[in-house]
Image (cartoon, helix red, strand yellow):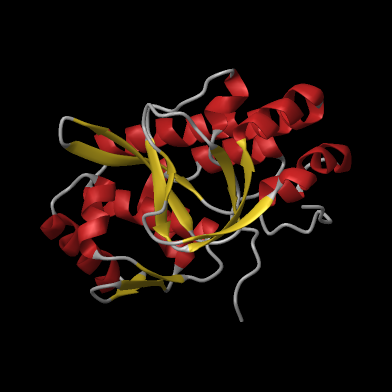
Amino acid sequence: MQMANTSRNQLLRGLPESAFRLLAPHIEQVDLPVRFPLEEAHRPIDFAYFLEGGLASVVAASGGMAIEVGLIGREGMTGTSLLFDDTESPFECYMQMSGQGLRVATPLLVAAVYQSPQLRRSLSRYARSATAQVAYTALSNGKTHIDARLARWLLMVDDRMVSSSFSITHEFLSLMLGVRRQGVTDALHILEGQGLISATRSKITIRDRKALVVFAGSTYGPAEVEYQRLTGHILGQIEREA
């Protein structure tokens, strides 16, 4: 489909005009419900998705274990393996919060990338920033307490959503953070007790973002700086709902 470059996806919107024109005829708008699979581990990638709403989780799974290693929202894309002459990912990727997106079939994206050095550079630099996010997630998971990890995760979600309130269950949070549900409940109570958030069984609202950043400590920030350095965009600069 032909379209002006008015996408709500930050990565697409920042493309040079000539690069976007290569993709525009091949872009398809799609609804993305919760749990919709964007990538399956070790299976061919059929489409690259550019989210315009909602949130996707990148999940590493093995031997019955699973943990979230990355988040994708309106700042990025799936299918980054395609930029490096690969056809699959070792990770699962699916919608954690429903939304909308734009997708491009794999052969068409690869052809456009090889035709346009500008397009390849722009998308590859985002892919590089995504590896930084994975690395700092590993650092956070291995070296910080669950309440600081949760604070970092909530900030990352807030960076990618159009509202500071979002729906998610304690059960799903426990899977994403790789801890027991009781640990998530206790961590939520700590953050709520300090006035940083309000939480019900299925909804979390960020009340004091600045204080939440302080609480998260040094694990929040480095990956976000890398995203800005590599892409030229600032996470969180997405229009908010009134």
Task: State the residue lying farthest toward the right.
Answer: 18
The reply, left or right, for residue 218 in relation to residue 11 is: left
Identified at 15% across, 36% down, the residue is: 64
Asked whether residue 195 appears in the rendered view, the answer is: no
The picture places residue 206, in percent across and down from the top left corner, at: 42, 70
* Image: 21 above or below 56: above
Residue at position x 50%, y 32% in the image: 45
Image quadrant where residue 119 sits: top right
Image-quadrant location for residue 85: top right
Looking at the rendered image, the quarter that the C terminus falls into is: bottom right
In this view of the protein, can residue 98 be seen by the observer?
Answer: yes
**Image coordinates for residue 25, horizontal then vertical, percent:** 79, 46
Is residue 232 toward the left or the right of residue 83 in the image? right
Who is closer to the viewer here, 87 or 175?
87
Q: Is residue 220 left or right of residue 14?
A: left
Residue in the picture at 17% in, 64% down: 185
Q: Position of residue 238 (x, y in %)?
A: 64, 62
